[in-house]
Amino acid sequence: MFLLALETSCDETSAAVVRDGAVLANVVSSQIQLHAEYGGVVPELATREHLRNLLPVAHAALREAGVTPPQLDAFAATRGPGLPNALMTGFKAAQAMAFASRRPFLGIHHHEAHLYSPWTVGDPPRADFASLEPNVSLIVSGGHTMLVHVRGEFDHIVLGSTLDDAAGECFDKTAKLLGLPYPGGPQMDLLAAEGNPGAFDFPRPLLREENDDFSFAGLKTSVRYFLEKHPGLSGDGQRLRDLCASVQAAIVETLVTKTVRAARRLGVRCVTASGGVTCNSALRRDLMTACEQAGLSLRLAEQGLCTDNAAMVGIVAERKLLVSSEGTNLDAEIDPGWALEDAGARN
Ligand code: KG4
Ligand code: ZN
């Protein structure tokens, strides 16, 4: 089966072709440059860009996969959560293609796509659902930070999530305070590599609380106060690198400690992580060390599948079609506030 998947939930326009668990093409057109001058994603501009790029990106994916439109057997798109109008562009396009060609259509939950992305590995990437075992999964990006208990395939419950800012948002907002370009996460990662993570002490929010929730708004505020007390710090190369490393250490320690603690409490033997912040080198390294020490196996989404992409949507869609053979109604609407708990049960 050849399946075309589209992802337009935020600021990445992406199309992928998957077949029998293999990713044949995964084309991503990022809008980062467009939004950089505003310091964040502008929903109206994102929608306009998706409309402009969607068909060229879809054609590029088909070309790369060596597939022509009549060969497509199924269509999928992200249904939610995400920016409403941005979601609408990919969702309605895929629905229309399915309607016109009388093929099945699947509306996929964005977090569910992230959740299973660590199981797609190799070059070319291929889904490995046969190895899936119960795990605790950290989904961490610019829009979401959550811990999920995956009990089995498409059987998962949310353990906790952020009460305010997402971890990626904390990276981005802190970087903005430091005058770094958007998105700040990758910039902070680079600068932190040459900084001292113990130079400044920042709060580890909710670290000692016996729950699986996160809160990063206070950390960002403490960086703001810190900068008010230390004007000119962001102009001092080494102190700036130390500050980035110290903030990164606070975020990473919180994420790692809470993830491993949840895994031990639930008695799973596996931890997974996905979403844009999973690109962070300190997070990858410290999760690996902590899991090794706790005797847990670790599956990190591969770098190219961490940030938003259509391959993860296509892989989940194809698997769902295989398991239940049921698609999503052709008159279904987007669901910008869709809760992950509701995703396993319905398409
Ligand atoms: O998953 P994603 O592409 O989009 C959302 O669904 O949010 O994640 C984007 C987020 C941004 O906040 C970005 O700063 C962060 O991932 N990010 C990083 C790194 N690479 C991307 N944060 C820290 N370190 C990185 N290396
Ligand atoms: Zn995402």
Image (spheres, rainbow, N blue to C red):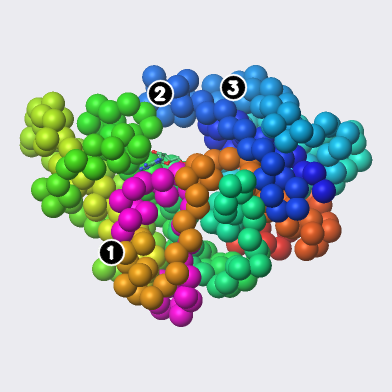
| Mark 1 surroundings within 10 Å by alpha-carbon count, few (fewer than 14), some (14 through 19), many (20 or more) | some
Q: Amino acid at mark 3?
A: Glu
Q: Amino acid at mark 1?
A: Leu
Name the one closer to the observer, 121 or 327: 121
Q: Earlier in the sequence, mark 3 or mark 2?
A: 2
* Residue 326 among those drawn in magenta: no
Residue beneath the point at 23% across and 42% down = 192
Residue position for label 2: 36
Q: Where are the magenta residues, as a range? A: 262-286
Q: Earlier in the sequence, mark 1 or mark 3?
A: 3
Residue position for label 3: 49
| Mark 2 surroundings within 10 Å by alpha-carbon count, few (fewer than 14), some (14 through 19), many (20 or more) | some
**Can you give x and y, in whole percent of width and height, for residue 67 in the image?**
79, 34
| Whole-number angstrom distance, CA of label 3 to CA of label 2 | 14 Å
Residue beneath the point at 48% across and 61% down = 299
Secondary structure found at label 3: helix
- Residue 70 to residue 74: above or below: above
| Whole-number angstrom distance, CA of label 1 to CA of label 3 | 39 Å
Residue position for label 1: 207
- Residue 255 to residue 69: above or below: below
